[in-house]
Image (tube, coloured by chain):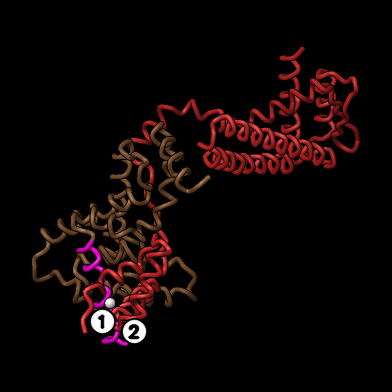
Chain colours: A red, B brown
Amino acid sequence: MSCNETAHIVAARFDDSLSPRQRRLLDEHVAACAECRDALADTQASAAQLRQWQEVPVPQWQRVPEGLREKQRASRPRFSFWTQWLPLATACMLALAVVLNVQVQIGGNGVQMAFGGSTQAQDISAQLAQFEQEQRTAQQQAMQQLAVQLEERQTTANLRLMETMVEQFGESTTRSMEQVLAYFEAQRQEDLQLLESSYQRLADSDFQTIRSVQQLANYVQYQGGQLQ
Amino acid sequence: MSLTDQDEALISAALEGSARAWERLVRRYEGRVYNFALRMTGNETEALDLMQEVFLGVYRNLQRFRGDSQFTTWLFRIAHNKAVDMNRRKYLLTPLASLGGAEQTEDEVLEQLHDETQEQNPLTLLDTEQRNAGVMKLLNRLSWDQRLVVELKVFQSCTFEEIAEMQDISANTAKTRFYTAMKLLKTQMEQTHVV
Ligand SMILES: [Zn+2]
């Protein structure tokens, strides 16, 4: 006995889009036709053998074609906002510190921060100058660690932001933008919190680098100058 | 947001000049294309060449992608054409006597695949090598056209209509070609006691 349908029957078994009715007809034929049953068993064994293939990782290669790299260079300013995220967040935080009248006190225990005091930026800088005198042997480490930590965070934050933006694209522009903004706000809050806790760590540490503290003072002075 | 929508978002961003969107799109499918290329060419260097040609083709034609088919279907149509081109070039450049794809020994296949799997965990390395070499050995028994049909059906889950369109044949011919190839593989497996 020879069946003319075997190639079609086999092909149909490898078709994921069969309707329930087509599937039933297929099953009926296979139940009645030994040739197709054998053919199906054979082809499924072959397919199973082929599916033993294990994914081989892709070697490193140049993914972005030259043409697009040039385009990207030409349009770099569009993206500078994201790469400037950390400086922006820092500036916001410091500006906020001035606006909220954050009081930084430097005593024997290092730098301390309080809200709502009356110390002006000028006083902070005077105190910092004093601190500089007192802490000649201060270490740079804490501040450097903070810088590294923030830099790493900036990278992951940007990646996550990009990812979210891409994933939210296209549903509806308005909704997407709202979500992106909400995400942006969440990121900003996280960064501010991190900055705050970093200040706290700075305050808890006895030895701070003069240069780093001086930089902070410059920031505060700069922002103060802008706002006053 | 579905995969298809994400693809389309990445494509429009790439068309507007975003290298990051392009890179994400590429990273999403490079594994599939690279492994396709490995199975079609049987060696790492050619597979890498083929994969690069495929994505360059995708990049150059990106504005022609209409979104009326899935991106993967479109991608593998390009991959299919590039593989055919490469095979044709290889055939033209290689003296007939040394066209020994089907005569390749298991050791040669193993050797070729060795480099590609080196970076993986040593414990799984041998297993992966052996499995892939076994698959390559089987695929090497098929004609080029059969190999393409099997690849597109078994690994890429294309429909027979899509395969027929790519190969410029009827869907019926694609089905017969597939069945013939799979039967041949089964015979091969029995001979080499793979099962
Ligand atoms: Zn039958």
Residue B68 position within the rendered picture, expressed as x and y whole percent measured from the top left? 35, 42
Q: Which mark is residue B188?
A: 1
Q: Along the line of sight, which residue is nearer the eye, A59 or A142?
A: A59
Within 10 Å of disc 1 (Cα), the crowding (few <14, some 14-19, many 20+) is: some
Q: Is residue A172 left or right of residue A125?
A: left
Q: Nearer the viewer, residue B178 or A100?
A: B178
- In the image, taking residue A163 as reference, residue A103 lies left or right, namely right
Q: Is residue A53 magenta?
A: no
- Provide the residue designation for mark 2: B194
Label 2: which secondary element: loop
User: Which SS does the magenta portion mostly show?
Assistant: helix
Q: Can you see residue B134?
A: no
- What is the secondary structure assignment of the residue under circle 1? helix
Residue extending farthest to the left is B96
Q: Is residue A143 or residue B89 the one in the foreground?
A: B89
User: What residue is at 33 percent from the left and 61 percent from the top?
Assistant: B36
Is the C terminus of chain A in the top left, top right, bottom left or bottom right quadrant? Answer: top right
Taking depth in this image into account, of A14 and A113 the one nearest to the observer is A14
**Which stretch is magenta?**
B172-195
Give the residue displayed 49% in from the left and 76% down from the top.
B123
- Residue B66, image x, y percentages: 34, 39
Tag 1 or tag 2, which sits nearer the N-term?
1
Q: CA distance from mark 2 to mark 1?
A: 8 Å
Q: Image check: B34 left or right of B143? A: right
Displayed quadrant of residue B129: bottom left
Examine the structure image and report whether residue B191 is included in the region drawn in magenta: yes
Parent chain of label 2? B
State the residue at coordinates (21%, 74%): A4
